[in-house]
Image: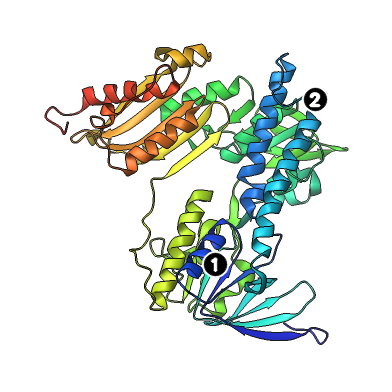
Amino acid sequence: MPTSHSSSSSRQAQAVVIGAGSAGMNAFHALRQWGVDVLLVDRGPLGTTCARVGCMPSKAMLHAAAQWQCLSQGTVSPVGTYQQPHQLWQQALAVRDELAGAQAQRTLALGERLLQGAARFTGPHTLEVEGQGGEITAITAQAFVLATGSRPVVPAALQALGDAVITTDALFSLEAPPPRVGVLGLGAIGVEMGMALQRLGCEVIAADLHTAPAGLTDPVAAELATAWLGRSLDMHLGQAAQVERVGCSLRFTVGHTSREVDRVLLAVGRRPNWEDLQLQHAVEDWPEKAQKLLNTQTLQVGSAPVFAAGDVSGIRPLMHEAVDQGRLAAWQVARLLGLSTGSEAPQPRTPLSIVFTNPDIAQVGMPWQALDPAHTVIGTARGAGNGRSKVMHARDNLLRIYADRATGRLLGATIVAERGEHLAHLLAWAVMRGETVHSLQELPTYHPCVEEMIPSALQDAARQCQPGGPR
């Protein structure tokens, strides 16, 4: 609430977007394109989660790790000579700062349409924005897009260990990589950062209660990924880890293995940022958990003129998904305002996730656990049968394509392979376009390349499809 020393003002708009991340920025620009009088609110820091502490710095760190691995093996780095891994770490942070800074400047360029401060609802059509100086701006609008993102989960039992336990938010603020690191959680973030730190010369031990890394459910792919990653990373899957302070260090214990570490990196999930918005003032029958009222198809929160997009929705928290949800939320707002967008509601694209661990781990379309075994065929291709994979010493490369047994229509795929990110994109496009194992074989494939694994897997799947299926 305003203090006696704070100033206050008021604004009116047709719509307000809260959060200037990937979802919020795309919602804002879509609404502007459709002629909506819209304001953007962000509490900072500007620059998007992706650019500051997410997918971009993590890829910069993975690239730095690959360079250091080449240098430590006596290979010449393509970008310069480095004596210590922290030099490459600093280079990666500089790239992060450049990307995040550029995004922040684009946001600041919105001028008076941008309000920097913390937003909280005071009614179904009203909210307050409190700036850093305590000034209050009261805003009245007809509709709202919530794109406030998420934050890393820190279990209460570990909070007492202070800054020795970090998340990626803090990891990318360190001046150099910690010499000894324990990693809790081996989803996409944990696996990527665990591998990057290991390749940068850190001693890493990692654990996860799940029995497969990177969210894999296909048992063949999970077994391969576990063995492949395990050659470089000390992984303990399906086991709980304990962390306790020992002098100036931490003791990381999992099973019969115990290591002293300098830091523990938490990668056990992220929590949507709903709490500070005080949505109970805007949404009737507001529950303790916001997702109970979220319609995952329309993104509307209950019956209120409020739509959630991006990580705050909890729906596949990936950058490209945030972009799609931002545009869908904007379309819903325009529709609520009675405006014509000249198009139907944006349709969801093929689910696609990639873990850039070299080997890449990718999942496309329908996941393995959702397949109906009686109506599905699985076409498999391995690096041992692919010339380019042999040249790259990547004989373990694996591609598993899922298709409908009767029609041959592509359903999805799981990939564990060097350069697997490229296979994943091609197959995501093919799934979305409704291609079949037969039609896709008609397209050209250059020789020699890893992409030749696709026709190999397609041939394997086609042999299993019912005779007389579409050709």
Nearer to us: label 1 or label 2: 2
Q: Residue at the far left: name it.
A: 468
Q: Residue at x 41, y 69 (%)?
A: 332
Question: Is residue 240 visible in the rendered structure shown here?
Answer: no
Local packing at callout 2 (Cα closer than 10 Å; few below 14, some 14-19, many 20+) is: few
- Residue 351 in picture, x, y percent from top left: 41, 45
Image quadrant in which the C terminus is located = top left
Q: Is residue 410 above or below residue 451?
A: below
Local packing at callout 1 (Cα closer than 10 Å; few below 14, some 14-19, many 20+) is: many
Asked whether, in this view, residue 352 is left or right of residue 114, the answer is: left
Give the residue at mark 2: 82
Question: Is residue 350 visible in the rendered structure shown here?
Answer: yes
Task: Identify residue type, mark 1.
Answer: Leu
Mark 1 secondary-structure assignment? strand
- Residue 236 in picture, x, y percent from top left: 61, 29
Task: Identify residue type, mark 2.
Answer: Tyr
Mark 2 secondary-structure assignment? loop
> Distance from label 1 to label 2 (Cα)?
44 Å
Residue 441 location, quadrant: top left
Q: Residue at the far right: name it.
A: 247
Give whichever of 457, 124 is nearer the camera: 457
Asked whether, in this view, residue 321 is left or right of residue 439, the answer is: right
| Residue 135: assigned label | none
